[in-house]
Image: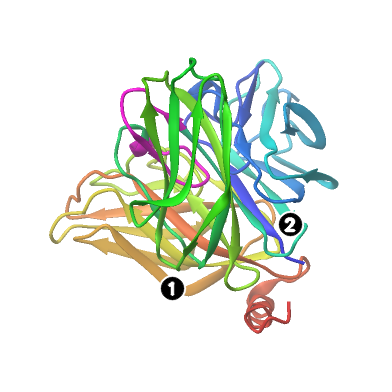
Amino acid sequence: MSKQLLGASTNANGMYTAGGTENANLAGSAYSANAFGTATQYISSDGVISSLKVWLDGGAGGGRAVTWTLYLNGAPTLLSTTITDPAVSNSDVTHNITVAPGDAVYVLVTAAGGATTRYGGYSMIFTPTVANNFIIPGWCQCNNGRTTYGVPWAYCVGGYAGNQEAVRMPCAGTIDRLYVGLNSAPAGGTGYIYHIQKALGNTAITCSIIGPASTASDLVNSVHFNQGDLIGIKAELSAGPASKDCGWGVRFIPDTPGQFPIFGNPSGQPDTAAVRYTSFEFSDCQATEIRHGCWQAGFWYSNLYVRLDTTTGAGKSYTFLLRQNTGDTQMTCTITNGQDNSDLTHSGQTADFVPVDMKITPSGGPAGTYVYYSMMGNVTSPTAGGKGSSNIARKLLESGII
């Protein structure tokens, strides 16, 4: 059975607002409402969402509780978990939520009054009804002053500013079934035209939202991506719409069964002179290691790609190092006098409630830049553990046995 890991982490705003609620992404940003508005994303394949696991970097204080609940088409589901201080993690591995193409999903976070701000992340598992029909959810803001761009999973800061942002596909496959929705309908006759982009150019996958409509889809066109191809989404203005929050989703069918992409980007630029840390999926860059995602056991990762939105400058560089449980992994690459690099040699195994983040080290005063990551994920037996088990599972997957 094929499975897919979906993860989300937070920036400087924390995982919740004390005494309030906000909605967050299924994959990408674990905090959205007060910072960016609504956080709905769209499902592009039949399947089941399950195994919600949440980790915080400390308790909420005073015995206070914080609850995370998956919402489907505006209504709460049974997939929910509560962390009550002094606990720092919890999960719901009991409930399975059936979803279908076109469904709208987000995570509602509810925190008790006076709860201490904490950082961390959560993850879930998507199991497609038809094996290897994976999902790529996305979320961005559409700027009413210019063409804007987004990347899969999280908010694309540089894209909102008009930069043509994109991220590398860590595995090859076909993308189709584009669904797009706005947080509210644009004024009649105005709206946005959406294009899935490959190699910074428009593909045949496109749809338009023109008021009074608030959703649209393209269920006809498809495009194949090779490993390493650039992917992004472009939103063009049509007749002067207001700025809107945009959720979207596409289906991904890998060339090699079991392979799926994991995406991420910092919400701000790394420092050009000092080491910074950021969670893999989405967060600001910090001088200390206080921003983490939370993945779960049963998966391995490989094929790290890193892309910058500008070149580093001659003789200047950034080094990117994936860290797990505050220790170095073997996944690393350095970008010198360029925009791209990768580590296609190393791999690692995920674990439950183990924090994951990226260490970014500048050298020589490189140019300020936004950063976009991707890695390839693959499924193993849920009980597999250790390097040997991961390698055995990988060989079985590559041979088509599982």
Locate the C terminus and report the quarter of the image it occupies.
bottom right
Tell me the element at label 1. strand
Which numbered mark, 1 or 2, is in the foreground of this view? 2
**In the image: residue 341, left or right of residue 356:** left
Residue 112 found in image quarter = top right
Asked whether the viewer can see residue 26, the reply is yes
Q: Nearer the viewer, residue 219 or 122?
A: 219
Tell me the element at label 2. strand
Which span is picked out in magenta? Answer: 141-159
Q: Which residue is mark 1?
A: 344
Residue 373 found in image quarter = bottom left
In the picture, the disc for residue 128 is: 2
Amino acid type, label 1: Leu
**In the image: residue 305, left or right of residue 249:** left
Asked whether the viewer can see residue 327, the reply is no
In the displayed structure, 377 sits above or below 70; it is below
Q: Position of residue 62 (x, y in %)?
A: 72, 23
Q: Position of residue 53 (x, y in %)?
A: 72, 46
Q: Position of residue 86 (x, y in %)?
A: 73, 33
In the displayed structure, 320 sits above or below 139; it is below
- Label 2 Cα neighbours within 10 Å, binned few <14 / some 14-19 / many ≥20: many
In the displayed structure, 163 sits above or below 141; it is below
What residue sits 67% from the left and 40% below the top? 102
Q: Position of residue 257 (x, y in %)?
A: 64, 71
Locate the N terminus and report the quarter of the image it occupies.
bottom right
Find out whether residue 40 is within the magenta segment: no
**In the image: residue 228, left or right of residue 177:** left
Amino acid type, label 2: Pro
